Image: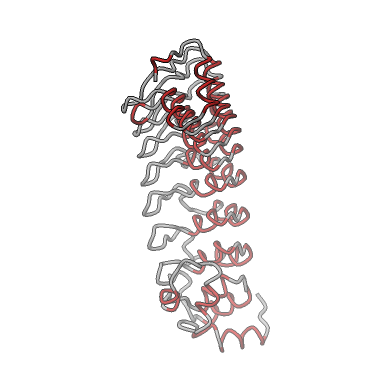
Amino acid sequence: MELSDRARSLALELFREYCGHKSIPLLLLRVRPLVPIFVLNNLQFNGLHCASFFGIDELVAALREMGCYDVNEGDLGGDTPLAWAAESGNEEVVKLLLRWEEVSPDKPNKHGQAPLSAAVRKGHEGVVKILLGREVNPDRSDCYHRTPLRYPAQRGDEGIVKMLLERREVHPDKPDDSGRTPLISAAGGGHVGVVKILPGRDEVNPNRPDIGGDTPLLGATFHGHEAVVKVLLGREDVDPNQSSHYDSTPLTCAAAKGHEGVVKLLLGRDEVNPDKPGECGWTPLAYAVRYQHHGIVKMLLERGGVDPTIPTDEGQTPLSLATTYSDERMVNLLRDYQAVSHSAI
């Protein structure tokens, strides 16, 4: 690359001995706002890191030509110039750095995250495409066992999800330390497009729970993501009754949260048990009465097969709950239901 005298001068005057410069924490606060100032002050962020981060390819080339820095040198956290360029989405600098044989395209930082993870985390599709064209591990887990696929799935970035899934070595159902799979992350975030894409790989188990027992369906139900719930329930291999380790079922969760649309979708599956109790013996009907979700109570009663006399572990029935909370409308609704009698109080 042809370098101007001005670029060489800037590189020599500032970037050659940039570590510890007082401008570093001010520059990095925008991209690392949660990192304490004293850490940013001691990040060992050098001139090549800075030029790569800001996409100044001319200075990157000048610094390399002058031999000022090791092109694979990591800062205090282990992030290399390539990782900083990838995080910022600076495609030209990424291409420039990768032209040099000594650059390691897959060198991880101290958290186990390689430049590819930095690019997918920030959604830089162009950089992801460039890096996937090199010898990188697209399924590398970090210290929390999060793979690159986790980030676009959680964010709903369908383009990057598709790119990663084109690589057969990417395991689409790999859980992190909390047991969360990419599908759980996508479902909980309401990203229906990604939820449709991920089960296209046979390795994906749509019922796989995290360490708390929450499945993709439970996550989508909890947040009221009707479109995601509809997609998941459209699959015959999805169990609509599977409960968490705390005995929460999709229906008890939706009833407690007041998500009428989700309740309607769940009740549309014949195998859904409308009386299956959740934590402490609370049925969907008991939850709906307790939180005064009249529309859901009506839907449950109209579904048929619902026993409104089932008590919780504490002995409270739906009718006694309605009476306790002085909900006259709910009391009348329950009493009008033929299976309810005053003895249920």
Tell which of 139 and 100 is nearer to you. 139
The residue nearer to you, when weighing 130 against 23, is 23
**Front-most of 203 and 69?**
203
Task: Answer with left or right where residue 311 lies relative to residue 189.
Answer: left
**Residue 124's x, y, as percent?**
60, 56
Q: Quadrant of the C terminus?
A: top left
| In the image, residue 245 above or below residue 270 | below
Farthest residue toward the top? 338
Left or right: residue 84 compared with residue 77: right
Residue drawn where x is 57% and y is 36% of the image: 225
Q: Is residue 143 visible?
A: yes
Please name the residue shown 49% across and 42% down the image: 185
State the scheme by which the image is colored: secondary structure
From this viewpoint, is residue 239 visible? no
Q: Residue at x 47, y 19 (%)?
A: 272
Q: Residue at x 42, y 40 (%)?
A: 174
Q: Position of residue 104 (x, y in %)?
A: 46, 62
Q: Position of residue 139 (x, y in %)?
A: 45, 47
In the rendered image, the quadrant that contains the N terminus is bottom right
Q: Position of residue 64 (x, y in %)?
A: 53, 77
> Which quarter of the figure has residue 176?
top left
- Determine which quarter of the picture holds residue 110: bottom left
